[in-house]
Image: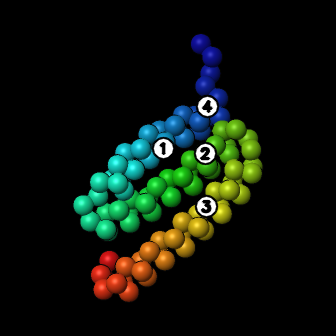
Amino acid sequence: MTPVSLEDVFLAAAAMFVILAIAVFYRAVAGPTTQDRLLAVNVLGTNTVVILALLAAGLDQSWFLDVALIYALLNFLMSIAISKFTVERGGVL
């Protein structure tokens, strides 16, 4: 029996996060309220950053971490912009 390498564990964890992202995507599309959709999109962004970090570790490609950092910053700015837009329309998150 061959031992499982740490890279394989990282890649398996990334695959599980992809499955989780599919379930969260359903909530983003079918969410009954704007708050549900906003939270689901934010979770999808965070999930994507985690997947990219796991791929960087599993495939030994450090540029995935650069992409993950940029995506995390864009995800943060997107959530702030959507929150500001929702509050300006009269809604309260």
Instruction: Mark 3 or mark 1: name the one nearer the start of the chain.
Output: 1
Against 8, residue 18 (above or below) is: below
Residue beneath disc 2: 54
Q: Are marks 4 and 3 in contact (CB under 8 Å)?
A: no
Q: Mark 1, residues whose alpha carbon is within 10 Å: few (<14), some, or many (≥20)?
A: some
* CA separation in Å, label 4 and label 2: 10 Å
Q: Are marks 2 and 1 in contact (CB under 8 Å)?
A: yes
* CA separation in Å, label 2 and label 1: 10 Å
Element type at marker 3? Answer: helix
Within the image, what quadrant is residue 9 found in?
top right
Give me the disc on residue 17: 1
* CA separation in Å, label 4 and label 3: 24 Å
Q: Mark 4, residues whose alpha carbon is within 10 Å: few (<14), some, or many (≥20)?
A: few
Query: Which residue is at the front of the view, 56 or 29?
Result: 29
Residue beneath disc 4: 8
Instruction: Mark 4 or mark 1: name the one nearer the start of the chain.
Output: 4
Q: Amino acid at mark 4?
A: Asp
Across and down, in percent, residue 4 comes to 61, 25
Q: Are marks 2 and 3 in contact (CB under 8 Å)?
A: no
Element type at marker 2? Answer: helix
Q: Residue at x 38, y 86 (%)?
A: 88
Give me the disc on residue 45: none
Q: Quadrant of the N terminus?
A: top right
